[in-house]
Each structure stands twice: as C-alpha cells, then as structure tokens.
Amino acid sequence: MTSTSLEPFFYPHGVAVIGASQDPSKLGYGLARNLVQCNYQGAVHFVNPKGGQLLDRPVYTNIAAVPNPVDLAVLLIPAMAVPQALRECGERGLRAVIIASGGFREIGSEGTALEAECLNIARTYGMRLLGPNCIGLLDTHLPLDVTFLPPPAPVPGEIAFISHSGAICAAVIDWAHGQGFGFSRLVSLGNQADINETDVLAPVAADPHTRVITFYMEGVSHGRRFVDEASRVVRQKPIIVQKVGRFAGGQRAMASHTGALAGQESAYEAAFHRAGMIRAETTEELFDWARALAWCPLPRGRSVAVLTNAGGPGVTAADALEANGLHLSDLSHESCIALNYILPPVASIHNPVDMLASASPELYAACLKILLADSGVDAVMVIMPPPPMYAASAIAKAIIPLIQSADKPVLVCPMGERLVHEAVELFQAAHIPDYRFPERAAASLGIMAQRVEYLQKVVKDGILSNKQLDIDPESVRKILSEAEKKALKVGDTFKFWLPPKTVNQILAVYAIPTLPVELAHNPEEAVSLADRLGYPVALKVASPDIPHKSDVGGVLLNLEDAKVVALGYETVMRNTLSACPQAEILGVQVQRMIPPGQEVILGAVQDPQFGALVMFGSGGVEVEGLNDVAFALAPLQPSDAEELLEKTWAGRKLHGYRSLPPADRNAVLDILMRLAKLATDFPQLIEIEINPLRVLSEGQGAFALDIRVRIG
C-alpha cells in the first residue's frame, strides 16, 4: 500500500469526522471542536447516524451523504463498527483514513483479528490508514487539528513530533506551553496497522516550517527501510529520537562473544548512528536539543566562551563543556585587552569571563559583543544567576538583539526560577534557548557540534566513495550451498558451525588473511601436520559443542617440537573430555604460530530488524567482561570502519601505547570492510567471529587466528 500518497493526511481539502458527538463529555465532541477552533480553511463535515447540528454545522447520517470536497476521514467510533465505516469510506472514494478508536491489537487476539480485517478492507479500496488507537495529527501552520486533545492547542513552532504513544503527545504539548516552544507538526502513530514511522518521515520533513524532527519511539517496523529513509531526511533536517524499552528485552542467547554482546540496543545504536540520528536519553533532552537546533545557527567547532557574573557557575560550565566533548576557547589577545578595558580590575578576563555580581545589563551586552567577535570562539554560553543589583529581565533585553543578529549560537542560563521568570519569558519569545543550569546548555552545544561533524562526514563520504573491494562472491555461494546441505542433515541448522576448512575457503575469497588449520585425529597425525606447517604450532580442540576452547583447557600454544606436540595432543583431549564428557570431539586442530602482536576481536551477526551488524573491540577470552566493543551496520564506509576503531580502547591502542609499537591499523580497517561485505552478501551466515585477530607491526598485516562461522 506504500504507493498511495499520504498528502491527504497533511493537506486535505475536506475532513469528515465520523463519530462527531454533540455531548461535550465525549471524545467525538473534542475532535469536532478542535477541527473547528483551529481555523482549518478546508471543508469540515460531521457524521453521526443521529444527524442534527453540531457547532453550527449539519451532521450527516452517513459518509455517502457528505458533499465534496472530502478526502480525509477521522473515525472515532466503537471498534466493532470500524470495518463497516471503512467500507463506506472506500465506496465514497476516500483514500486517507485516521482510526482514532481503540480496541484493536492492544487488547489481545480478538482486537488483532479486527485490526487485520480493517487493513484488508483498506487494501481492497487502496486506502491508507493512520492508527488505530492513535490521537490523530495536527499542523499548526496550515492549520489542521484532527486530534481530540484538550485545549489549548500547541502554538506554531519549528519542531515536529512523531510518537508511538498518544499519551506522550498530550503530555508534551501541555509541557511545551510552559517551556515556551511550539510544534510545526505532530503525528500519533498508534498501532501502525498500515502507516508506520518510516512512512511519515518524508512528509513531515517536507513541511517548510519544520526545522527539527523529534521522535518518541518504541520500536521500528522495518529496520533497514527506516535507516535508509532517515539517512535521506537527516541530511536536510536533524532527527532526534528517544528510544524507550532499552532494557526490557535482554540479550539474545547466542554461542559466540559477538552474539552475546549484540543485544537489541547495540543494533538500535548502530542504526541511529548510521542514519545520522541523534539519540536522547530523556524527554527533557529531546526538546532541549531540538530547541537549540531549531533556533540557533550551528557552531563552526567545539570551542566555547562562557560569560558569567559569578565564579561558581563558570566552573560548573567549564566541567560540563568538557564532559560533552567541548572545550573553553582561548580568547585572543585583542579580546582580552577589550575585556580588561571595560571590566573591574578584579574581574576575570580569561575564559570563563567573570564580570562579578555587579555586572550591569550594559556590561553583559558589551562583553558578549567582544566574545562573539573573537574568531576563536565558536559558541557562547551566557550564565545569569539572579543579579543582585539589576533585574534579570533588563539583562535579557540588553543581550537579545546581539544574540538574534549573531552568526554563532548563544545559549543562555538564567539560573533560578522566580527571580528570572520574566527574563525567561523574554528569551523564549525571542526563540533563544534557555536552560536553568549550565549542564543542560553544555549538552545542547555538544549535540550541535555533533550535527556539524555529521554534515561534514556526509560531504567527505560523498567525495571518498565506498572503498571498492575486488571480491567475487559466486564461489562462496557454491561453498555455502554444499555446507547448507550438510547443515540440513544435522537437523538443527541454527547450531551448525561451518568446519574450519570451509571457513578458510570463504575467508580466502574475501581476502581475509588466515593461517592454515589442519585437523589431526591422533598424536602421530598432529606431529606430521606440525612438521609440514612449521614450528612453533598451536593445538586447539575441534568440537561444534565447545565455542570457547580455552575455557576447557582445549588450547595449547608455542609447541616447539614433535615430542611436545604429541604430548600436547593427549593433553588437549584429556582436558576436554574431562570438562565436557558429552561433547562431540572431531579431533585437534594444528596451526602454525605467528609473531606476537596486538589481539582484537571482529564479529558479525544478523539482527532481525536491521540486518548485518559488525563488531570490533578488545579480543581474547575476557571480551565480554571488558565490554570494550563497538557495533556498526554493514556494509561499511571507510569512515565507518575508522569510527569503530576510535570508539574502543583496542582500536586506539593500535596507534601504539607505551612499550607497544604501532600496529598495522590499515590491515584491520581493510579486514573490517571485507568482513562487513561478507556479512551483507550472505545473510545466512548468522554469526561470524574472529577472535583473536592478531595485528602485527605496521606494514606486517594481521591474521585471523580463530574463526567461527554459523550458518542458519
């Protein structure tokens, strides 16, 4: 049904309210009232089998009797009556319907069946459905209000809000009145029987009054489609999302480190990052950041000047800025001279600039002008504890014209409540973001800098197109076809780990360096293989039932001669059988040792929502305990691979650390790109793990020492 346009939802020529009520205590009355009182300029029609008059308009007994124009219907009737009403809307030629009624999937199996029936009817007539179990939508600029929310309606603004929760919409609108900001559009998605969060992104972003899109999200319907659509939108307008339910589901139980660490939240974090979306932890953050992005020019960098009339708040601001990845500007010599000329001798002319408690409105304005003119200042935070000698509102009036004309962001902190109330109202009326304390302002400045760097990355990635990898996946298809036949014979394909030789063949096609691994079935065979591969060697137990070999004493390293290898074979077998007497043991793997180096982990899993997810971090047996890992959606751009490394201590350490020389970081980046492509090309590879990948010195390469691949 995605081919049908959503334009009638946002630009209807006429709206029919089916279930409009003359009873002021009914939601149907509230919906009718809001549509009339919002001053909607299109045709307004009310439908109720009882007929009569409502708000000086006729009430039609059925949708067929409604005159043109009408291209949007809003249903607020008992759930069991909705299917018939949908059929009548379809016969009337309507292609856009909002089902505000509840009583569907949210109540259980009976409601789920009713919702499916409604969707089938809509598909029959080529209709799009918003809801059910939603509060509708509104546009403050058109204007249009087809919600049943109590007045007052939101004031016109620049922030769009899309929500999976209707109750959150009601609370946020009421809260926004007290916070001094408004909305451009608001969309309540409800159960999303048809229209989902991805569908509304482009129409909401197309609104010329919308400067920032905010999301209250409980999940996504189609992960990759959402990421692709959000990636297109976010290049033009920032998207801030509050994703809830992050701790509810727990982690999927998988047998590898990668699988254990790749919980649902790792996938969402990677998805939001890939799309360029900003994730807020709280509703307050959601709109703190939205106001700053909607009302301020973006900074050129992360250098911030702080202007205050007291030392304590200045120190608080300095700490908060650093905590958010920002830093205090080094003021120019000219700025310091200018500040020294107008400030008292005991004032601080160095950042943070402390004008002292006696600072007048004129002094605030003069100092702010100097800071804004300094080329080393990217943004300014103005802090205003209640001034003892002047009204806070007088200071606000003095600096507002400077802030409005500046090409740099200025965020203000009128600290307190009652004594700064009038100043707060002035700032809000002037669309200048205000925060009671410096920490919130610093967080907003950090998000603005993040937005700038994202836009720079988009440009860079556009110039440096995705690295071309010379890979022919056809040979891997043949290898996997044979492996899948064997997996089917096992009976439970979810537990089928590919044998080492098959894994090495696949990785060879993708040019991921491995060391030959041979399987020995007795001590003599282990010695023969070691002689051929070259000493020293490692021995590792081969068993589909033992994912972590070292945990059971199934790994021996640096075996220097034939006698030690023969004894080592017996030791590995004895340790394993003692620890896992029921395990299926295929033999012992023999592998040549390579020089020491740094060890990292690379992995990939198939997330049910977002597809291939790639992991990088600290390797070895303690990977889950260290939790030094980062995830990204595959495939990777070169910049994505760089970010994965820089997010972890394991990746940063590759540059060299203390006695550790720099490792071959470029080899790791190349292998990451290739692993991501492998996971993307073959989604049936549900888990891939290289642990460890040993990274040798610069220019010497990296080798996958232990690789596990599961097919499903």
Image: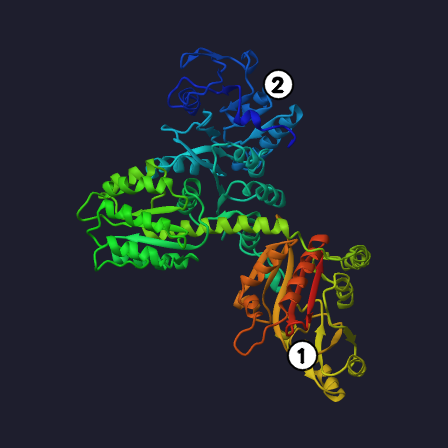
State which mark lies toward you, 1 or 2. Answer: 1
Q: Which residue is mark 2?
A: 93
In the foreground, 255 or 7 = 7
Looking at the image, residue 104 sits to the left or right of residue 365; the answer is right
Q: According to the image, label 1 marks what residue?
A: 595
| Residue kind at label 2, given as amino acid type | Gly
Element type where label 1 sits in the image = loop
Does any portion of residue 514 appear in the rendered image?
Answer: yes
Q: Is residue 261 visible?
A: no
Vertical position of residue 51 compared to residue 685: above or below:
above
Q: Quadrant of residue 550 in the image?
A: bottom right
For the C terminus, the quadrant is bottom right
Q: Which mark is residue 699?
A: none
* Left or right for 369, reference 105: left
What is the CA distance from the residue labelled 1 to the residue labelled 2? 74 Å
Q: Quadrant of residue 147?
A: top left
Q: Is residue 617 above or below residue 270?
A: below
Q: Residue furthest left?
A: 389
Q: Is residue 314 above or below residue 190?
A: below
Which residue is at a point 50% across and 24% down the rendered structure image? 77
**Residue contact at pointers 1 and 2, CB within 8 angstroms:** no
